[in-house]
Amino acid sequence: MSTRKASLTDKQAKNGTSKYVLERCASVNEYYDIAFKVMLLGDSAVGKTCVLVRFKDGAFLGGNFIATVGIDFRNKVVDVDNLKVKLQIWDTAGQERFRSVTHAYYRDAQALLLIYDITNKPSFDNIRAWLTEIHEYAQKDVVIMLLGNKSDMAAERVVKTEEGEKLAKECGIPFMETSAKTGVNIELAFHAVAKELKHRATQQPNDPKFKIHEYIDSQKHKSGCCKQA
């Protein structure tokens, strides 16, 4: 197996975009040019594992399954502007007793998907506490996205779409509602994050800045899956 790296200097490897080392690697016949770590955060039972499995395998974990213990991860390579972007996605346990384990991984993540359950008000109310932890333990320039999961369960909704939009706007982060069951907006969420990270890593001084909010809005209108009631 051969590996070619367009390595950055040691000095670059310690600042901002340095952590995004451009590389071409072959692993289990899957090539990628650049890799990033993404963490899924949120209370227990909001559907973090289901979101990950939907994105990675295109499947839904219906019925009962064992809750995540500590932390787990999966990889997926996606195409972003003619580059192969590998996302190493960390699935974390939402229970309080595993929180110290999760904290240890915050610093290595370039993006965080913060998830709540639209049928569970406490999971939404706890988002601010999660954001406090993020600001304490994560990188200062980490990409954060807010996801309101289980949008397919409209009859059981207790958190309005507008509430999620308002919180995200206050925090200056992108937001969308998702459904691991139907797949609504799952691909878009991960691809938007991948695109943002790729632009940060490869952007030249005179290149226009990638606007993740505008990208998400444009993709929603294209697909016609803006919101679910």
Image: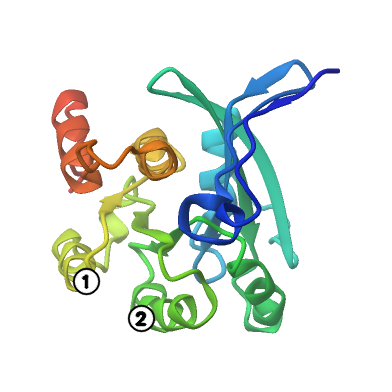
When asked about the image quadrant of residue 181, the answer is: top left
- How crowded pointer 2 is (Cα within 10 Å; few <14, some 14-19, many 20+) is rated as few
Q: Nearer the viewer, residue 35 or 104?
A: 35
Residue 61 visible, this angle: no
When asked about the image quadrant of residue 14, the answer is: bottom right
Q: Residue at x 55, y 45 (%)?
A: 20
Q: Residue at x 70, y 77 (%)?
A: 98
Measured as percent of width and height from the top left, residue 125 is found at: 34, 80
Residue 22 vs 151, above or below: the answer is above
Q: Nearer the viewer, residue 190 or 66?
A: 190
Q: Which residue is mark 2?
A: 128
Residue 88 visible, this angle: yes
Marks 1 and 2, the one that precedes in the sequence: 2
Q: Is disc 2 placed on a helix, strand or loop? A: helix
Q: Nearer the viewer, residue 75 or 20?
A: 20
Quadrant of image for the N terminus? top right
Q: Nearer the viewer, residue 128 or 119?
A: 128
Pointer 1 with pointer 2, Cβ within 8 A = yes
Q: Which mark is residue 167?
A: 1
Q: Residue at x 56, y 53 (%)?
A: 12
Measured as percent of width and height from the top left, residue 53 is found at: 59, 39
Q: Amino acid at mark 2?
A: Arg
Lateral position of residue 177 relative to residue 116, left or right: left
Separation of disc 1 and disc 2 at Cα?
A: 9 Å
Measured as percent of width and height from the top left, residue 60 is found at: 55, 37
Q: Amino acid at mark 1?
A: Leu
Q: Is disc 1 placed on a helix, strand or loop? A: helix
| Scheme of image coloration | rainbow
- How crowded pointer 1 is (Cα within 10 Å; few <14, some 14-19, many 20+) is rated as some
User: Count the marks: how many?
Assistant: 2
